[in-house]
Image: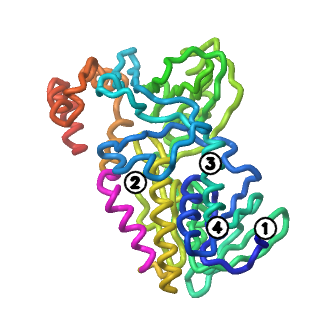
């Protein structure tokens, strides 16, 4: 077993998907330390655990399996379709059958197993992994990040590195310590609560989403995981909580839609649904995943973005070490590559999120009425525009302002 050192090429703070991918990529030719504050990687679960398998127009320009080889041990169930529910009960459904494929559209993961696998892959690539190790600050010299102050099981120590990667989640402390303002406005954060439920009858292999005022500024999700179990959760926009907790909204939702279900696990947390940060790099510093606000602003989904940003950051960190230059000018290659692959579409998605949260229940119902019964041949821009033309003029004006 490798003993702890005080000198590394790269230190990654946070062993979620983004951090583990960055550590794995950099460890190919660098001395890497990956630290995680919790004693158990992947626990508690922090999301609904869904990932798409295919490229998604306007959202992802890549596929899940480009980054991870699927292991059935951490796949709870396959996704064969999606159903969106309006406040008045109108539904819009898209399925693999509609699209002419028997292949799954996505997976529901067992995140505890999935995250651990990614961390094991990083260790297998050569990264040193330390759990129960909390970052307490950065080592700063002449405005540049030169390492991390750490505490492992009550023992404080410092570890120096040429590059520090902050993968420490929403409102990243690593980013703040490095001079990047990672504070989120209430309108740009979803406050979430989720039960893992047993004794619940769900549509097999179908993801259900619920929109409207019962989940202000957000949505509820129902993800089946097999054996009469599933994840039932919701996210409420911070600016629309109205003095209530997300758990209060969740309990009301479950009582209405799944009164016979039984919770066996509860997780709560926050998710950024914001515009991009002005920068995600500094001298000796990069932010990845949720720390860099690399979540999709409408859904809050972050696993795909974490895999992608972590991989890019790890490659750029390795390059900076080889060049013996970890200045922000060099590390900005990571930021530029990320923006080139995702930036333009992400800005549009943020505008779309602002548009969606402005809609009343009646306006949401109107949209669903327009798209109810949509066919596979209409799943394109031309088909969408044709259906939107029949909307109320005030809604059309809102859409024009969005575009």
Residue 243 location, quadrant: top right
Kindly tell me whether residue 295 is visible in this rendering: yes
Q: Which mark is residue 311?
A: none
Mark 3 crowd level (few <14, some 14–19, many ≥20, 10 Å Cα) = many
Q: Residue at 39%, 31% (x, y): give it.
A: 103
Q: Residue furthest right?
A: 154
Q: Which mark is residue 115?
A: 3
* Residue placed under numbered mark 1 in the picture: 1
Q: Earlier in the sequence, mark 1 or mark 3?
A: 1
Q: Earlier in the sequence, mark 2 or mark 1?
A: 1
Q: Nearer the viewer, mark 2 or mark 1?
A: 1
* Residue placed under numbered mark 4 in the picture: 126
Q: Residue at 62%, 28% (x, y): give it.
A: 248
Residue 195 location, quadrant: top right
Q: Earlier in the sequence, mark 2 or mark 4?
A: 4
Q: Nearer the viewer, mark 2 or mark 4?
A: 4
* Residue placed under numbered mark 2 in the picture: 275
Q: Residue at 64%, 23% (x, y): give it.
A: 197
- Looking at the rendered structure, the secondary structure element under dot 1 is loop
Taking depth in this image into account, of 69 and 315 the one nearest to the observer is 69
Q: Earlier in the sequence, mark 4 or mark 3?
A: 3
Pinpoint residue 130: horizontal percent, then vertical percent.
Answer: 73, 62
Report the magenta residues as a range. Answer: 330-347
Real-space Cα separation, disc 4 to disc 3, in angstroms:
17 Å
Pinpoint residue 356: horizontal percent, then vertical percent.
Answer: 35, 36
């Amino acid at each position: 077993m490798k003993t702890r050192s005080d000198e590394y090429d790269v230190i990654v703070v946070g062993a979620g998907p983004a951090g583990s991918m960055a550590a794995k990529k950099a460890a190919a030719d660098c001395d890497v330390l990956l630290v995680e504050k919790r004693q158990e990687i992947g626990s508690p679960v922090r999301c609904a655990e869904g990932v798409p398998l295919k490229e998604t127009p306007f959202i992802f320009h890549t596929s899940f399996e480009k980054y991870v080889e699927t292991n059935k041990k951490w796949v709870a169930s396959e996704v064969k379709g999606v159903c969106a529910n309006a406040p008045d009960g109108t539904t819009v459904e898209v399925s693999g059958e509609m699209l002419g494929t028997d292949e799954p559209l996505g997976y529901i993961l067992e995140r505890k197993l999935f995250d651990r696998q990614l961390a094991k892959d990083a260790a297998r690539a050569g990264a040193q992994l330390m759990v129960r190790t909390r970052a307490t600050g950065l080592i700063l010299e002449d405005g540049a990040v030169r390492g991390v102050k750490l505490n492992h099981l009550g023992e404080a120590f410092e570890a120096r590195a040429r590059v520090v990667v902050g993968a420490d989640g929403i409102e990243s402390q690593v980013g703040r310590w490095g001079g990047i303002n990672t504070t989120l406005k209430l309108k740009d954060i979803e406050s979430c609560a989720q039960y893992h439920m047993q004794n619940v009858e769900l549509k097999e292999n179908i993801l259900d989403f619920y929109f409207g005022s019962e989940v202000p500024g957000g949505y509820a999700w129902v993800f089946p995981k097999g054996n009469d179990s599933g994840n039932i959760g919701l996210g409420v926009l911070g600016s629309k909580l109205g003095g209530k907790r997300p758990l209060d909204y969740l309990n009301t939702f479950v009582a209405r839609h799944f009164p016979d279900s039984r919770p066996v696990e509860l997780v709560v947390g926050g998710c950024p649904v914001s515009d991009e940060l002005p920068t995600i790099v500094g001298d000796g510093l990069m932010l990845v995943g949720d720390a860099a606000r690399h979540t999709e602003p409408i859904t809050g989904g972050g696993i795909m973005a974490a895999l992608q940003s972590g991989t890019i950051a790890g490659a750029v960190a390795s390059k900076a070490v080889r060049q013996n230059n970890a200045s922000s000018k060099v590390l900005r290659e990571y930021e530029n590559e990320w923006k080139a692959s995702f930036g333009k579409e992400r800005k549009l998605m943020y505008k779309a999120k602002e548009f969606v949260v402005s809609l009343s229940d009646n306006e949401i119902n109107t949209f669903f009425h327009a798209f109810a019964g949509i066919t596979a041949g209409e799943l394109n821009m031309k088909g969408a525009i044709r259906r939107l033309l029949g909307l109320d003029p005030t809604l059309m004006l809102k859409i024009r302002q969005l575009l």
